[in-house]
Image (cartoon, rainbow, N blue to C red):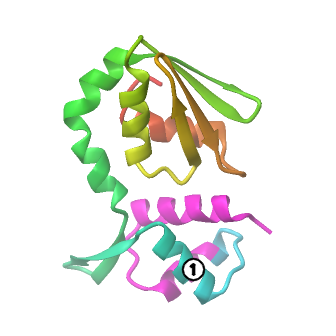
Amino acid sequence: MKNKSERLLQIRKLIASEKIASQDEMLSLLVEKGFTMTQATLSRDLKYLRVSKLHDAEKGYVYFLPESDIQESFTPWTGFLIEGYVSIEFAQNLVIMKTLPGYASSIASAIDSMGMVELAGTIAGDDTIIMVPRDGSNKQEIKKQLGMVIPGI
């Protein structure tokens, strides 16, 4: 059985890649991907992810993730984030990001605002950020998500 983090990641991927209009449709797609769950569990997961619906000309109302709006709002920050970023490494199930002195707090705040399902939280010092991944999160997905606001990671 796949864990909650994997399930939440898959839901995010499905919403980002397909127009899904109902929980039944979402549940069918998740079953195809190897997940077994009830409609009630899916409903809780959608609420946890703060999934909403938007009108679509083809399918009526479809699911969308508010994170896509958040990521677009980081465009003015991109230069600042890139400027302050130094390096990233993974150790003992933690993610350690080095920044220039004074940048860690602001970059950690931007990362927290992304609402990444993969991360339980961040701790920032002056030039170092420690990110705590959720169980089942993988390095590639974390790097991909961080790369959306800090290109080049």
Determine whether 95 is above or below 145 in the image.
above
Give how far across and how far down residue 64 sits, in percent: 35, 68
Whether residue 148 is visible to the viewer of this picture, yes or no, is: no
Residue indicated by mark 1: 42
Q: Is the magenta stretch mostly helix, strand or loop?
A: helix
Which residue is found at the position 34% from the left and 74% from the top?
Answer: 52
- Count residues near mark 1 (Cα–Cα under 10 Å), then give few for <14, some for 14-19, many for 20+: some
Between 150 and 107, the one nearer to me in the picture: 107
- Left or right: residue 91 versus residue 41 is right
| Closer-to-camera residue (111/153) | 111
Position in image of residue 99 (x %, y %)? 45, 16
Q: Name the image quarter holding the N terminus.
A: bottom right
Image height check: is 131 above or below 96? below
How many numbered marks have been drawn onto this rendered protein structure?
1
47 is within the stretch colored magenta: no
Residue span colored magenta: 1-30
Residue at 58 percent of width and 63 percent of height: 8
